[in-house]
Image (cartoon, grey):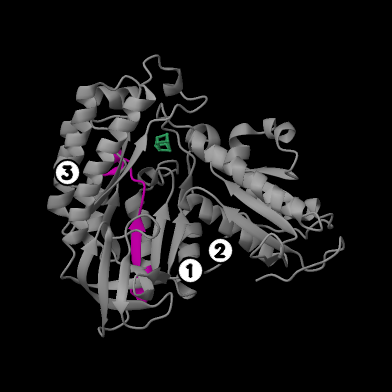
Amino acid sequence: MGSRSSMSTIDNPSVLYVTLGCAKNEVDTDRMRALLLEDGFGEADTVEDADAIIINTCSFLASATSESIETTLELADNVAAGVRSRPIVMCGCVPSRYGDELKGELPEVSAFVRADEEDGIVRVVRNVLGMGEPPMQDVCGQALRTIEGTSAYVKISDGCDRFCSFCAIPYIRGAYYSRPADEIVAEVHRLMEGGVREIVLIGQDTGIWGSDFKPRRTLSDLLRLVAEEVRPYGGWVRVLYLQPEGMTDELIATIRDTKEVLPYIDIPIQHCCEGILSRMNRSGSIEELRALFDRLRSEIPGMVLRTTGMAGFPGETDEEAEELASFIAEQEFDYTSVFAYSPEEGTAAAEMADQIDEDVKLERTQRLIDIAEAMGFAATARHVGERVKVIVDGVEQGERGPELIGHAWFQAPDSDGAIHIEEGEATVGDIVSCDLVDSFCYELIGVMVEDGDDL
Ligand code: SF4
């Protein structure tokens, strides 16, 4: 909680942080928060309590850009309704994508900060508040995080060089670069010392981590280093956003043989038909994907698979749409996110002539969602009867009053289902054992049992 200042001479200014989009943005916001805290800024919970507002935006899809702008305008309305001005600083993907165009379009915003400029956030916020220059902050290579909760995302890379034809990320986040291993390990170390027990490694394309180093390094090297850091604490490591080509023999062996690395893999396939994949500027075919998933399941005991499918890519025929639906059904993925293709400004696919009608896209999307849910709900139900460790994430209002909510090893925080703990007492952040007694949709019902408190 930050303290509130009242006049233009600001002694203990507070910042309200609003984060939109994915977990990668949460990590970036946290880094900015850590830099500002180090400079003496407090944190505000409401517009009313804030001296400045940082909105970290998403521009992955046109709808995300619209949401970012609408949220910014709502914040500006709230500021205008108050008795004093509070500058708004817009950060992240929208400024990265639209740059100087925004200055004329959004006069409500006092400063725009691209994703690659966020380490200079202290200077920007001081500037918009009319404060003096900050003391020199050497943030290069620092593992800056605030520590909250028992699970933490750690970004291992940024940018992307793949240029999938539907995706704006390479234009927004720039070229791929890996964070150095020592910086990542230092961040993990601090998080574990601060009470975190689950590390979730993220990036646009985690599988090629280290390929830009000389000599080249691999995600397996990094996983082994991170596993060593979490081992003394009995912690978990989870890795998200692996492209199919990133699943090397070495990586499969590392996941299989490293106890701390969860047998949970998130591989966004987008499609399974070779022709569509090729026009997406991606590689692979249904046979290759089938072989990969068969291999993962046979070599890694208990393998849990998450994927992403896209409906209505330009030129997708009825047969190709059906083939993707059948593949998702056949593979019985534990979790499948489904997206309707949306033409993103500046991407190659947006220029393709054979765009699919919205009605057809929606129909195909719904069909994929129905199949994905049927498979996912069944996969969730298969956990009933297990005894699992659960990280308690919060409290929600259940049918019978407030209940604890948590997640187990087979559920990525914030993206998959949750465990509703119907009996037992615990505090948010605790690790408890639960017998899973029932399920509904992607959710499970757990009853707490005494069985130690390590993961
Ligand atoms: S791998 Fe493809 S979909 Fe993923 S961020 Fe890179 S370009 Fe976009």
Position above or below: 329 against 168: below
Regarding mark 3 in the picture, which secondary structure is present there?
helix
Q: Residue at x 20, y 40 (%)?
A: 328
Residue interval drawn in magenta: 230-247
Q: Nearer the viewer, mark 3 or mark 2?
A: 3
Residue 416 at what x, y percent from top left? Answer: 33, 56
Callout 2–callout 1 Cβ contact below 8 Å: yes
Pointer 2: residues within 10 angstroms few (<14), some, or many (20+)? many
How many numbered marks does the figure carry? 3
Q: CA distance from mark 3 to mark 2?
A: 38 Å
Q: CA distance from mark 2 to mark 1?
A: 8 Å
Q: Amino acid at mark 1?
A: Leu
Callout 3–callout 2 Cβ contact below 8 Å: no
Q: Amino acid at mark 2?
A: Arg
Is 150 covered by the magenta stretch? Answer: no
In front of the other: 328 or 451:
328
Quadrant (top left/top right/bottom left/bottom right) for the C terminus: bottom left
Q: Residue at x 45, y 18 (%)?
A: 351
Pointer 3: residues within 10 angstroms few (<14), some, or many (20+)? some
* Sequence-earlier tag: 3 or 1: 1
In front of the other: 82 or 435:
82
Q: Amino acid at mark 3?
A: Gln
Quadrant (top left/top right/bottom left/bottom right) for the N terminus: bottom right
- Does ligand 1 reach within 8 Å of label 1's beta carbon? no
Extreme residue toward the front, this view: 399
- Does ligand 1 reach within 8 Å of label 3's beta carbon? no
Residue 191's tag is 1
Residue 339's tag is none
Residue occupied by mark 3: 331
* Sequence-earlier tag: 2 or 1: 2
Residue occupied by mark 2: 145
